[in-house]
Amino acid sequence: MAKVKKQPRPKAITPKGFRDYFGEEVSQRSEMLQAIAGVYHRYGFDALESSAVETVEALGKFLPDVDRPNEGVFAWQEYDEGGNGDWMALRYDLTAPLARVYAQHRNDLPTPYRRYAMGPVWRNEKPGPGRYRQFYQCDADTVGTASMAADAEICAMLSDTLETVGIPRGDYLVRVNNRKVLNGVLEAMGLEAGDAKRDDVLRTIDKFDKVGEAGVRELLTKGRLDASGAFIDGVGLSDDQAAPVLAFLTSKGADAAKTLANLSEAVGSSSIGAEGVGELEQIGDLLAAGGYGADRIDIDPSVVRGLGYYTGPVYEAELTFEILDEKGRKRQFGSVSGGGRYDDLVKRFTGQEVPATGVSIGVDRLLAALREKGRIKAEATGPVVVTVMDKARMADYQAMVAELRNAGIRAEVYLGNPKNFGNQLKYADKRNSPIAVIEGGEEKDRGVVQIKDLILGAQIAENATLEEWKERPSQFEMPRGDLVAKVREILAGQG
């Protein structure tokens, strides 16, 4: 009889491009998102929690590649006997679901509709260092108004949000531009709608932050050698044709008025370009009226990301403080948020243009920035651990932990094997616990407990002399009735 082959055990590994998040990371993210939600709520935005799964048809052209339904997203076809089941996909972002929700429920929703959403999104893209296939987004959008006041409000709210979570004024800048201005520049270049070179120009403009003014000039005209020595073909424009683009990208002036004047010159006689400059002027005036100066929100034509997607104003929040990269070189932290006006999104469902504008915050990047600024502890504090000296007295220990919890103190009873007391303290250290509570039979008879300050104990063990150790004991004995008060006092001192 043939030997039955054993089923191999599954490998305990995360799928490629995914990761696990443990206690402190989850808590830090939750705390930050709660603070952000508070700002959004204060601005009058309502929470929306839409389905994590959408039809591929609803996600539509907003996928990176729509030649095949499952490119760019995690998708599957529902079972159907005829083989014609719907294609479903995990949401790629939080904006496309908003368009579907608004189109579906527009008769029941207020106009304008102001919503915020927070949650994971999934992208079936090649993973890399720091680039995952599942990550969190945090969005706020206003649907149903073309007023520039909506865009100005989003920028103001983004500024307030960064300061609320712990990025001080001077360490960030919200920069604003407008796609209509760029359309005016393209018109001034003689590139009308439908001209194949328009997309080439847009792609080149998007490289401005990497190659600079000289690099863009070369890419728009004859081409250039990249850092590896490979030659990149240029768009083939003349120097005169390329001039309006360069004027647009370098039009930042000493103040908003000068910047707007330079942009007006760059768009020439283009009406759509003039409209874009006028919108930027409106946004600037509204922000100034609200007390938001150029030190917080600034008109900056060098903001070019997303110009192929947005239809009007675009904005980006950049953190300006310096960090060290993996090679020890100083660099600015960079962008943590972006957004803009997208007036064509809902039209796919309704056939009617519905103006909309919104912003998305990169949750993981903002968390990383807060850690860099020391606004979030790298290691979260664990619970107070009530040790177990006698298994038969578990009810006494549960009574202790209940008192602590009822007083608002995070606490737990050790639930492992209590035979080796040293292992209980090792457990508390691994949990990063601030305090251990000890009550053996002798302490029980005398009506006292021992409280061990684990944070102070670790500091003393690392630095203190014997004399200092005697002067600053890390373990105290006190009446059982003083347990909660003493734990509170120690925690306050540690904080």
Image (cartoon, rainbow, N blue to C red):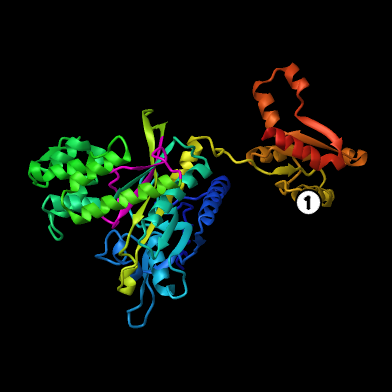
Q: Which residue is mark 1?
A: 402
Point 24% across, 51% down: residue: 181
Mark 1 neighbour class, 10 Å CA radius: few under 14, some 14 to 19, many 20 or more: some
Q: Percent position (x, y) of residue 211?
A: 22, 37
- Which quarter of the figure has residue 85? bottom left
Q: Percent position (x, y) of residue 457?
A: 70, 29
Work out which residue is located at the far bottom of the displayed protein and give it.
82
Point 77% across, 20% down: residue: 471
Point 30% across, 55% down: residue: 312
Vertical comparison of 212 with 345: above or below = above
Residue 310: say if magenta: yes
Residue 460: say if magenta: no
- Which quarter of the figure has residue 218? top left
Q: Nearer the viewer, residue 175 or 433?
A: 175
Q: Secondary structure at mark 1?
A: helix
Work out which residue is located at the far right of the displayed protein and give it.
445
Q: Quadrant of the C terminus?
A: top right
The magenta region covers 291-320
Left or right of 444? Residue 422 is left
Left or right of 82? Residue 481 is right
Point 36% across, 32% down: residue: 331
Q: Nearer the viewer, residue 98 or 150?
A: 150
Q: Percent position (x, y) of residue 330?
A: 37, 29
Vertical comparison of 12 with 380: above or below = below
Q: Tell me the kind of residue under disc 1.
A: Ala
Q: Nearer the viewer, residue 286 or 383?
A: 286
How many labels, in total?
1
| Residue 234 visible | no
| Residue 42 visible | yes
Left or right of 293? Residue 20 is right
